[in-house]
Image (cartoon, coloured by chain):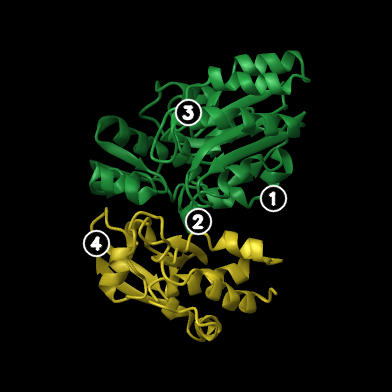
């Protein structure tokens, strides 16, 4: 079936099978920041923003993405740079595989959480797994971004 | 978690045709006429099932993503995401932390933004904690063909298999509710979940055992006859409810922690 996708405010026409998931289509188009990790909804590395909400692209049927605004980390531009700089300044970026999804989710978290605390941040980011950093360095950078001591 | 399930099962859901019917009547006809069709909810759990369907029926554009408050009820559309329900102030105003607590630890926010309440209920999935919470509320389900059915009737038998769930209807009631669970890590599935309410007499539900949630009869009758006998009622749960084993916990372990969770929940409600 034919599909018109709105990715980072640009339109892309593509052909898909009805049972294909957004993750695979985004990577076929060239959005390689959207990673394929567990592919079963557990690790969070395939997260994108759909209607502004962090969503697992491995669980989202591509056919449902017609006329839906999709944002990947590329679409955040300089807004992503600020988060990345704060995480890197804490020495937290190692293999980098979870980085794009963590940045996207952190960006969405800033918009959603009214009164952020460390507990709320940890809860919000529970679906973003990182197998090498141990989270502490990332959390230091994210706390700075969120204005939490 | 889900990854382990998928690897054990060996593949992902596939279907030949993706259809978005314009109305429920058409959708129901497709569902009834094609026994190998499936209604697509959030496709979070369905995706990791190793099944091939002829037709995937998508109803996400038919307006079933809503939470409405009427004079006596809260109505939740079947396509409402678990995260939307978790963060809805109206729901939390009436049912305390019962519903939120049953949702807030399920994997991650991204997952709960996709998973729908309709999918969680219709699949009668053992690990969905929301089913434990809904059992102790005055809750009904509205289907396209079968009309209104009580939630507890729906999940305790499999008489309704091919129908379309439209919405969940929860009666607004005064009283208290409490939800307790135990899990190995914060974003894993729960080993056990317990919900207690006193909205219309005391109700006790035990879920993720690991099978579908179940209402207590004996322990509930006992505590309703004497609200002071919390310890005795909690201990009765271990023998009344059947517990199974999975990769997260043995049945014996579940049987041991159930009375503790029930006791804590009863103490909060009474």
Position in image of residue A77 (x %, y %): 48, 84
Q: Which residue is mark 2?
A: B108
Please identify the quadrant where the N terminus of chain A is shown: bottom left
Question: Disc 4, disc 3: CB below 8 Å?
Answer: no
Please identify the quadrant where the C terminus of chain A is shown: bottom right
Disc nearer the start of the sequence (3/2): 2
Camera-side mark, 2 or 1: 2
For disc 2, the chain is: B
Looking at the image, is B200 positioned above or below residue A78?
A: above
Question: Could you classify mark 4 by the number of other residues whose Cα lies within 10 Å: few (under 14), some (14-19), or many (20 or more)?
Answer: some
Camera-side mark, 1 or 4: 1
Residue at image location 30% in from the left, 30% down from the top: B32
Q: Which residue is mark 4?
A: A16
Q: Which residue is mark 3?
A: B252
With A6 as the anchor, is B18 left or right in this view? left
Position in image of residue B235 (x %, y %): 63, 21
Looking at the image, is B97 positioned above or below residue B154?
A: below
Residue at image location 49% in from the left, 69% down from the top: A134
Front-most of B47 and A90?
A90
- Chain A, hue in figure: yellow
For disc 4, the chain is: A
With B231 as the anchor, is B254 left or right in this view? left
- Give me the disc on residue B89: 1
Distance (Cα) linking label 4 and label 3: 48 Å
Camera-side mark, 4 or 2: 2
């Amino acid at each position: 079936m034919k599909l018109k996708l709105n990715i980072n405010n640009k339109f892309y026409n593509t052909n898909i099978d009805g049972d294909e998931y957004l993750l695979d289509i985004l990577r076929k188009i060239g959005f390689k920041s959207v990673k394929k990790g567990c592919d079963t909804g557990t690790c969070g590395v395939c997260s994108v923003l759909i209607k502004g909400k962090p969503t697992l692209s491995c669980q989202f049927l591509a056919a449902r993405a017609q006329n839906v605004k999709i944002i990947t980390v590329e679409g955040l531009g300089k807004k992503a740079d600020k988060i990345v700089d704060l995480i890197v300044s804490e020495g937290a970026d190692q293999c980098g595989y979870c980085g794009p999804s963590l940045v996207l989710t952190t960006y969405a978290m800033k918009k959603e959480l009214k009164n952020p605390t460390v507990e709320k941040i940890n809860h919000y980011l529970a679906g973003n797994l990182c197998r090498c950093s141990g989270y502490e360095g990332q959390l230091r950078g994210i706390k700075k971004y969120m204005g939490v001591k | 978690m889900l990854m382990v399930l998928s690897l054990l099962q060996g593949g992902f859901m596939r279907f030949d045709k993706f259809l978005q019917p314009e109305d429920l009547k058409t959708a129901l006809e497709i569902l009834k006429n094609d026994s190998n069709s499936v209604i697509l909810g959030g496709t979070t759990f369905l995706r990791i099932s190793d099944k091939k369907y002829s037709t995937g029926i998508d109803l996400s554009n038919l307006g079933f993503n809503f939470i409405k408050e009427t004079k006596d009820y809260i109505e939740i559309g079947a396509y409402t995401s678990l995260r939307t329900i978790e963060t809805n102030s109206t729901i939390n105003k009436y049912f305390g932390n019962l519903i939120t607590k049953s949702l807030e630890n399920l994997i991650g926010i991204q997952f709960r933004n996709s998973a729908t309440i309709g999918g969680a209920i219709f699949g009668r999935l053992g690990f969905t904690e929301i089913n434990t919470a809904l059992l102790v509320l005055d809750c009904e389900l509205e289907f396209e063909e079968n009309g209104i059915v009580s939630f507890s009737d729906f999940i305790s038998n499999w008489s309704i298999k091919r129908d379309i769930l439209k919405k969940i209807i929860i009666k607004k009631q005064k009283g208290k509710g409490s939800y307790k669970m135990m899990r190995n890590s914060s974003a894993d599935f729960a080993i056990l979940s317990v919900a207690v309410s006193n909205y219309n007499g005391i109700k006790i539900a035990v879920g993720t055992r690991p099978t579908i949630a179940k209402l207590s009869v004996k322990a509930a009758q006992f505590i309703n006859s004497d609200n002071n006998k919390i310890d005795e009622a909690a201990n009765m749960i271990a023998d009344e409810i059947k517990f199974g084993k999975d990769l997260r916990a043995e049945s014996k372990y579940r049987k041991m922690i159930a009375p503790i969770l029930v006791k804590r929940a009863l103490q909060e409600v009474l």
